[in-house]
């Protein structure tokens, strides 16, 4: 067994989401959103290099020694699966291993908005799942793919960097391709997928102009495209897509969004009241004629009002979702306060008053 596996095994036993290894500090586990050190000595550069290089292939070593960061899937000897990122920093090596559960969670078990399973029934268009790193986007998408795989007889092509959850074909055929291993880039992967008779295309990250453009083409030509962006609200997602493409394509991009975008799900993970878990909280936008008109007339700043009043269509603002979860005692109100946009309406729920704004008595 690779010596690295001992830390990963400990992390899995503790139920952590990530194992962090860095020179100058002991190994650390991310537990329910917070980092906790393992009782172990500070890692030296040579020691950590030994741990890391023991699990790399010759090609991966060559790539990393060439000065590039390294992203790959790693399966430990006892069967644990991890998404790994290896990098160099000022003091030496660093590495993060994210635990990928062996079983794909059922979509109905994730506590997502009721509209999400319905989005899986579309045959054409684009659904975007957005959020910062570590907010569960990969889990949501994997569950959506599994839902389609279980209920529809279609050809699903998944492009990932790296492959995380492993899908077994059920009613559908699921083809998983890894960027850097099977295809050179997401854009090339989408281009190739268009020639492989796909019904559903998952694009692990819409990270550049070419990938976004290819994904838009796929969505416009009779395919359901699922993708991710590192944006933290529905409106920011729309603006990011428009801004990512050349200015002379701005009108064409807005037209695409108004006609082919199905929905945007902006996801956050908020601590549960006992602090021993996290719950997905989602801001959801579902395309309507009113929202399409706001996009075409450059009035995206008015879209939040549509989300606020569009509950019957499956829409909600982040603050609305947070309030409902607080009232249902599903999330910690202090953590919810930290994520809320309009924090004033959440102040009455806060238990740790130190996080509230300080009142200057001299001004009162």
Image: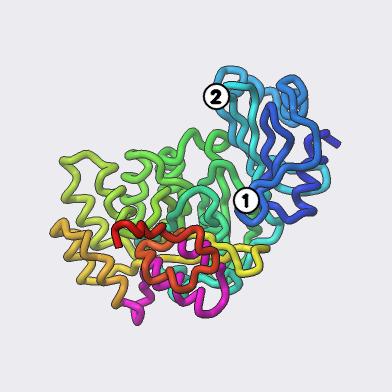
Observer-nearest of 266 and 248: 266
| Residue 154 in view here | no
Residue 104 location in percent, x, y?
64, 61
Mark 1 or mark 2: name the one nearer the start of the chain. Answer: 1
Considering every residue shown, the one lying at the far front of the view is 362
Image coordinates for residue 63, horizontal then vertical, percent: 59, 23
Q: Can the viewer see residue 39 in this picture? A: yes
Vertical side of 75 occupied by 12: above or below: below
Q: In the figure, is residue 173 to the left or right of 11? A: left
Q: Residues within 10 Å of mark 1 (few under 14, many from 20)?
A: few
What residue span does the magenta drawing correspond to? Answer: 310-337
Left or right? Give the position of 111 relative to 251.
Answer: right
Residue lying at 58% horizontally and 42% vertically, measured from the top left: 162
Q: Secondary structure at mark 2?
A: loop
Badge 2: few (under 14), some or many (20 or more) residues near its Cα, within 10 Å?
some
Residue that mark 2 sits on:
68
Q: How far apart are the two marked residues, 1 and 2, measured between alpha carbons?
A: 28 Å
- Along the viewing direction, whichever of 248 and 231 lies nearer the viewer: 231
Q: What numbered label is drawn on residue 164? A: none
Q: What residue appears at the point 49 percent right and 66 percent down from the top-left corner?
A: 281
Residue drawn at point x = 69 percent, y = 46 percent = 36
Viewer-proximal residue, 43 or 125? 43
Task: Assign the N terminus to one quadrant of the image.
Answer: top right
Which residue is the extreme one toward the left? 297
Q: Secondary structure at mark 1?
A: strand
221 to the left or right of 290 = right
Residue that carries the numbered disc 1 in the rendered image: 34
Vertical position of residue 230 compared to residue 58: above or below: below
The residue that appears at 59% across and 28% down in the rendered structure is 87
Q: Is residue 324 magenta?
A: yes
Residue 225 falls within the magenta-colored stretch: no
């Amino acid at each position: 067994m690779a010596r690295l596996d001992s830390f990963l095994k400990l992390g899995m036993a503790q139920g952590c989401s990530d194992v962090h290894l860095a020179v100058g500090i002991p190994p650390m586990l991310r537990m329910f959103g917070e980092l906790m050190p393992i009782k172990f000595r500070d890692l030296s550069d040579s020691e950590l290099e030994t741990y890391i290089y023991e699990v790399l292939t010759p090609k991966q070593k060559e790539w990393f020694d060439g000065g590039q960061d390294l992203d790959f899937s790693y399966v430990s000897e006892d069967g644990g699966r991890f998404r790994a990122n290896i990098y160099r920093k000022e003091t030496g090596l660093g590495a993060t291993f994210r635990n990928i559960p062996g079983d794909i969670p059922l979509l109905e078990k994730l506590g997502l908005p009721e509209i999400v399973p319905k989005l899986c029934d579309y045959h054409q268009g684009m659904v975007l799942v957005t959020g910062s790193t570590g907010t569960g986007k990969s889990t949501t998408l994997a569950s959506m793919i599994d839902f389609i795989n279980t209920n529809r007889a279609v050809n699903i092509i998944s492009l990932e960097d790296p492959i995380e959850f492993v899908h077994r074909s059920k009613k559908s055929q699921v083809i998983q391709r890894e960027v850097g291993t099977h295809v050179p880039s997401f854009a090339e992967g989408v281009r190739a997928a268009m020639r492989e008779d796909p019904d559903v295309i998952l694009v692990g990250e819409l990270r550049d102009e070419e990938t976004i453009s290819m994904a838009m083409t796929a969505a416009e030509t009779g395919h359901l495209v699922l993708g991710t962006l590192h944006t933290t609200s529905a409106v920011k997602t729309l603006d990011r897509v428009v801004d990512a493409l050349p200015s002379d394509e701005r009108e064409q991009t807005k037209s695409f969004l108004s006609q082919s975008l199905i929905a945007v799900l902006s996801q956050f993970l908020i601590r549960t009241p006992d602090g021993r878990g996290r719950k997905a909280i989602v801001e959801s936008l579902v395309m309507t004629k009113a929202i399409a008109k706001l996009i075409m007339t450059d009035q995206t700043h008015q879209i939040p009002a549509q989300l606020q009043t569009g509950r019957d269509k499956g829409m909600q603002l982040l603050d609305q979702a947070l309030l409902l979860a607080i009232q249902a005692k599903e999330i910690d109100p202090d953590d919810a306060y930290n994520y809320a946009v309009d924090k004033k309406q959440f102040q009455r729920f806060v238990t740790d008053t130190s996080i509230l704004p300080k009142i200057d008595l001299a001004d009162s």
